[in-house]
Structures are given as C-alpha cells and as structure tokens.
Image (cartoon, rainbow, N blue to C red):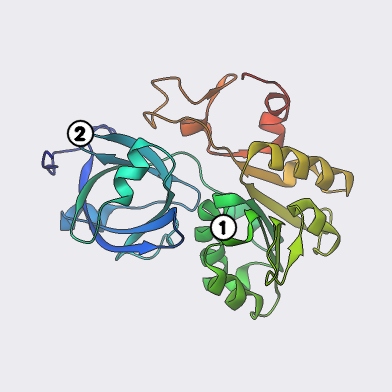
Amino acid sequence: MHAIDNAPDTAGLVPLAAEIIQFIQETPSIFTLRLRFTDPAAHAAYRFAPGQFNMLYLPGVGEVPISIVSDPQDEHLYDHTIRAVGRVTHALANLREGSRIGVRGPFGRGWPLTEAQGRDVVIVTGGLGCAPVVSVINYILKRRAQFGHLTIMQGVRHADDLIWRERYEAWAELPDTQVLLAASDGSPIWPWHVGHVPDLFDQARLTPGVSLVMMCGPEGMMRAASGDLIARGIPERDLWMSMERNMHCGMGLCGHCQMGPKFVCQDGPVFNYPEIKALLARKGV
C-alpha cells in the first residue's frame, strides 16, 4: 500500500493523511472510524458543519463519501460511521488503530441549524440514515437553550440493525426530548414499535409552523414521510432531507451524483424539500 503524504491541498483535490485512533465495531456490518489528521496544522485548521461529509481514500482501493458524525466543536477527533457494503467500505472495515487513510473535505451543504434555533426539531431517520444526523443531535444537546423540543425518530429494517442503542436510551432520559424507535422486523425482545417510521408520527410532537423536520435515510422512506408530514400541516419549507447519491468526486465535476440540475455533493447533500420535490417523484433523475 502506498503512503499518503501531507501534500498541499488544492481546492479539496489532495487527500490529507489521517490516522485511525480508534476502530469501533458497532454491529457485524457497521463500524466507526475515529480519525485524527497527522499534520497538527491541518488538524487545527479543519472545520465542518453538521450534515457535511468527507471523501475517505484508501490507496490502491478507492474513495467513498462518508458523513461526519462528530460535534463540530470537537477539535480532537473526527468520527465516521460506515456500513460495509462495497469494495472500499469492506477494505476500510479491515483496518485497525494506527492505520492511515486519506481525507478530502468537508464537502456539501449541512443542516439548517440557524433556521432551527428557537424551534422544535424533529429528526426522522431510517437505516444508517441516523449517522448524518448524530452530529445534529449532539449539537443541539450541547446548546439546549437555543432550541425547543427535540424529537428523535429512527427506523430500521431488522431489530439487530439498531446501532447506538445506549445513546437512544440516554437521549430518551433527557428533558424536553422524545425518542421513538421502530423496526420493520422486530424480535421477541424488541421493546419498541414494530413497523415503519411514519407509523410513529401520531406519537410525535408535530406543530405546524413551529416544528422543523430533518430527514435522512432511504429515498422512498423520505418521500413517504414527507407526504405524511405535509398532510399533517407541516409546511414544505420546514422539511429538510439529506440525499444519498453516488458521489465520486465531492466537487461537482464527475456528474455521478447529478440530480436534475443539482449536484448532491455541492448543492446538498442537505436540501430543502421545495428544492427537490419534483425530482423525488421522477425515476432515473
């Protein structure tokens, strides 16, 4: 494997070397890489917003876009939670503490935290869609007085797919915070709802004009959830979603993540619903 040098970056083109400080196996197929840039100056200068992503590069294997799940004010380590589903992610899953990878970024537009201040925040996620919003949850909880009621909704396909169970249980104990969990395929010891995320809306605190909704997960789930929320009176402008498309470069150059006239890696990955509602209903866009 070739070494990764700390070469000068040029508009995000050159990966910077980062060391894996901790490898956390969340589930048999999901893991977290806790990273630190090897160049102290690069580490000190690095900044990101919740909802942005990095391109993680493994020499000789390839590159993959991964959301940053850390709090943006944590200047010590940067976490990326990954599901091993392809060639690059399976190779990353075989790394351990002390290994080095390349990092480009951050890229994209993050969550609308300025717009969310003073309002109730409803987070709706499916599958590993929880990863891109973990930084938002941490951000809100560390600045609790700036936000209203927090509702965290997470749906998984199988009960065993729920990662960070301890976090959800801890969040549920916090004041002015509601946690609602669902699994399409529950288990005999699954204590929460068996079904889909939209089934939980009847239990959620949804106040039109007050609640701001952030969604991430499978596109079909977000499309269905959006329709349900709009029918419940939530204005379209208060719906935000993080799109998952095939991002190769992170810079709007390769065109792989083009969605109509937009590039998910640059114009998103977080979009306001009115920006993309016409594109969600069109196959092949």
Q: Nearer the viewer, mark 2 or mark 1?
A: 1
Disc 2 marks which amino acid?
Answer: Gly
Q: Position of residue 141 (x, y in %)?
A: 56, 71
10 Å crowding of disc 1: few (<14), some (14-19), many (20+): some
Depth order, front residue of 178/186? 186
Q: Indicate the quadrant where residue 162 lies.
A: bottom right
Identify the residue shown where x is 70% and y is 61%: 186
Disc 1 marks which amino acid?
Answer: Asp
Rendered-image quadrant of the N terminus: top left
Q: Helix, strand or loop at disc 1?
A: helix
Do residues under tags 2 and 1 come within 8 Å of each other at their CB atoms?
A: no
Which residue, given by chain and number where applicable, does mark 1 sit on? 161
Identify the residue shown where x is 39% and y is 29%: 248
Depth order, front residue of 238/99? 99
Q: Position of residue 97 (x, y in %)?
A: 22, 61
Q: Position of residue 169 (x, y in %)?
A: 61, 75
- Rendered position, 172 above or below 26: below
Which residue, given by chain and number where applicable, does mark 2 sit on? 60
Count of marks overlaid on the render: 2
Inter-mark Cα distance, 2 to 1: 30 Å
